[in-house]
Structure formats: structure tokens, C-alpha cells
Image (cartoon, rainbow, N blue to C red):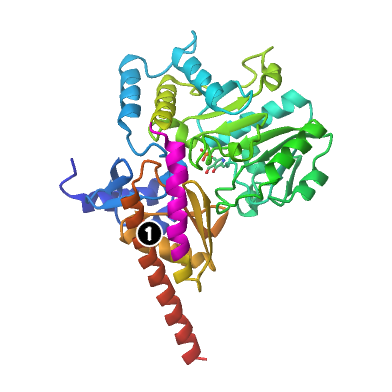
Amino acid sequence: MRPEHPEQIVQATLDKYARYINAGLAKLYRFADVMTTEWEASGAVIRDIYGKEYLDCSGGPAVFNVGHRHPRVIAAVQEQLDRMPMSVRAMPRQGEADLAELLAQITPGDLQYTFFANSGAEANEGALKLARLATGRTEFVAAEGAFHGKTMGALSASGRDKYKTPFQPLVPGFRHVPFGDIDALDRAVTTRTAAVILEPIQGENGVIIPPDTYLPAVREICTRRGALLILDEVQTGLARTGRMFACEHWGVVPDILTMAKALGGGVVPIGAFTGRPSVWKALESDPYLHSSTFGGNPLACAAGIATIRVIQDEHLAERAGELGGYLLDRLTEVARRHSGIIRQVRGKGLLLGMEFTDPDLVLLVTAEALQRGVIVFYSLNNPATFRIAPPLIITKAQLDRAVMALDESIGVAEALLAEVAADVKTHS
Ligand SMILES: Cc1ncc(COP(=O)(O)O)c(C=O)c1O
């Protein structure tokens, strides 16, 4: 049911953002002319308070792998909601045990034990702590341009100064090397390194895919120096790139794998890290050394189990691979038509990035696309690139519609740029 006076709700919401959330954020929405609110969603479509439809080509980003409000996820969460939504944590919980078992089955190699958290940053925090505990070492090697979250440890591992500098000093002991450069990593990893932490594909850095030899070589260096390998699959995990986990593209098994975003089926937040038995031993003597009140809560676990079942039953990894190849071809044609302002289109599965010559063009194109009912977002660590990470259940016809809208939006940005250039010429 939509309200009778949507415009009043929109105004009041923006006013409250300005007064009670963040005046800068309210200003940004007003500046970008986003004078509406999210209202309802289903599959790959969201509707605003006025009933206008938008194709979700951002997916949260990468949260809605099974689409918005998948009926099986909703039913599982509803059943748990009616029975016991939250845990008193005094007795073992079946849902948490079942989800941990499922994760042991779907993660690669001998990854077996899982700790449940509530977000991607929290999953990475836990993984970093476990690496210190298991190795007795304190240093970490991470990648430039990386995004691992914004809590102190995760931020220390991340690679963009804009988000780090205001919060210095961060956690000591982190060294950053260029992503994809195996020689630099080889020089940085020493016998003091507790772990190397990497995304298999850098999502927030604009979908950067490393050379095929990179991750296997990283694995080999870590093993040789006794350092653990933490792979952050918060964005790439759960079928997004055409495999259940992106590291499978290169046959690499980390010591700890972190995930979040899509695991809750777009219904309940959840994060997790899964590790090898040899690493997990460090947590056995005191299982409360690392803990979380809401981690592994029954609602989130019900959502997680249903989500994994949907991904398996609907073959969403294969679907992401096929549709991703199709979309990459279509967007490459678009890039050819607008080669003056688009540098590159790249992607794996349904995680794609379109890089422009200037970040302002990305703002313009995303605003134009929104007007045309398509949602895409810029990447946090590479604002010249916008990311396309739609629900994996999206149809080819919906992708075609999105490509058409993006093509038009890019055309508008290109024309505007040409106008500005002509203006500058006449006035100089
Ligand atoms: C690879 C990666 N790791 C960690 C995070 C942080 O996750 P959260 O925002 O849930 O803390 C993100 C979020 O975009 C991410 O892309």
C-alpha cells in the first residue's frame, strides 16, 4: 500500500536526514535530485514511494544475489520469526550448526569451521584477530586500493587514504603493495607476517581482476613463509562471479575466507569467516575469546541456509557466468560507441565495472540512469568506475533494458562534455 501524500513523506524524510542523520548526506541527495524514497522491492526491481520502477543493477552492492524478497528466504525467516527470532545463547542452536555445516560443504578445500558475525567489516576483524592468534605474529600485508570495511582493523587493511587518514593512528603492522604485483608481495611477506589479506577481485576499487598467475603465487608465498592467506569474499562470494567463491576460478584455497553481503539473502544481515581446522585450533581453548551478541542469530542463519539452497537449486553461479559474459559483450559495444569518455569495461560473472575518463562523468551517468529507472553505483575506492552487480536472477530482457538506459545516459554525459568543451573554446 502506497501512502496518500508521498511528496510529504519524501520532504519529511529528507528533513529528518538533515536534522537527525547527517546534513551532508541530505544535501547530497538533494544535489543529485533524488527527491523520492525507497518503498518496496521484488526480484530485480525496486519501486519508490511514487510507484516508479527501477531495475536494481547495483544489488546493494552484491547483497541481492537471490533477488529482493526471494519467497524461500522470506518463508524461512518468517518461520523462524514465528518460533524464536533471537537466541539467549544458553543452548546450542540448530540453525547456526546447519549453516556452518553448509558453509563447510560449499567453501573450497578443507575450510571447515565458521564464526558468525553481522557484517563484512566484522567478519574481516575476526579473521585478522584469528590470524594473529593462530600464528603468534602481528604483521599483515594487504593491497593498495583494497576495501575490507571501515572498522579499525578492516580499515587498516584497506587501501584508500581518503577513508584512513582522518582516523590515524590505525592498527599498526599493515603494509600495502600494488594489487596483482607478485614481486612486490614476495618482498613484503616475511616471517613476521601473520597473514596476507586480499580480495580475489577488488570490487570497491572498480572491479580489478588480477592476472591468472597472481593468486596461486600468493598462496605459494604464504605457505612458504608460514603466513596465512585471508581471502575477503564479502563482495565476490556466493555465486556473484560465476563460481560459488571467486577463489575457485584460480583453484586457490585460503586459510580463512570471509563473507557477508549476499549470505543473508538480502533479508537479514550476516557476516562470517570460515577457516581450516589447523587455524581454528587457536580458538578451542577459549571459545569466547572472540564473540558477538547477534552473530549467528537464528533469523540470520535461517536466511543464510535458505539463500545457499536457492543459489544451488537455481544454479545461480552458472547463471551469473552466462549472463555476465552476455552483459560484458553488450557493455563492450556501448564502450566502443562512447570511446571518448569510457576507458574500459571489465568483469567476471555478474560483477562488472565501467571505467570513465573522469569521476564527474560517473556521477552524471548514474544520475541519468536513475532518471531512466536503472540503479548503478560508483565504486568507493575508484569513483571513476561504476559497478554493475545486479541480482543473479535478473533476466536477459531486463539486462537489455539496463544496457539501453545506460547507453542513453552515457550519450547525455558525452553530449554535455562536448558542449562544455565547445563553450570553453569559444570563450578562450
Ligand atoms: C570486499 C569487501 N569487504 C568488506 C566490506 C565491508 O562490508 P560491510 O559494509 O558489511 O562492513 C565490503 C563492503 O563493500 C567489501 O566490498
- Residue 104 relative to residue 365: left or right: right
Q: How many numbered marks have been drawn onto this rendered protein structure? A: 1
Q: Judge whether 19 appears above or below 80 on screen.
A: below
Q: Which residues are magenta?
A: 314-333
Q: Residue at x 82, y 34 (%)?
A: 192
Q: Where is residue 289 shown, x and y percent of the image?
A: 65, 19
Q: Judge whether 105 appears above or below 182 on screen.
A: above
Is residue 139 in view from this perspective? no
Q: Where is residue 7 shown, x and y percent of the image?
A: 22, 53
Viewer-side residue, 64 vs 109:
109
Q: Residue at x 51, y 43 (%)?
A: 241
Q: Quadrant of the N terminus?
A: top left
Q: Quadrant of residue 120?
A: top right
Q: Does the stretch in magenta take in 351? A: no
The residue that disc 1 covers is 403
Q: Where is residue 266 shown, x and y percent of the image?
A: 39, 35
- Residue 60 relative to residue 9: left or right: right
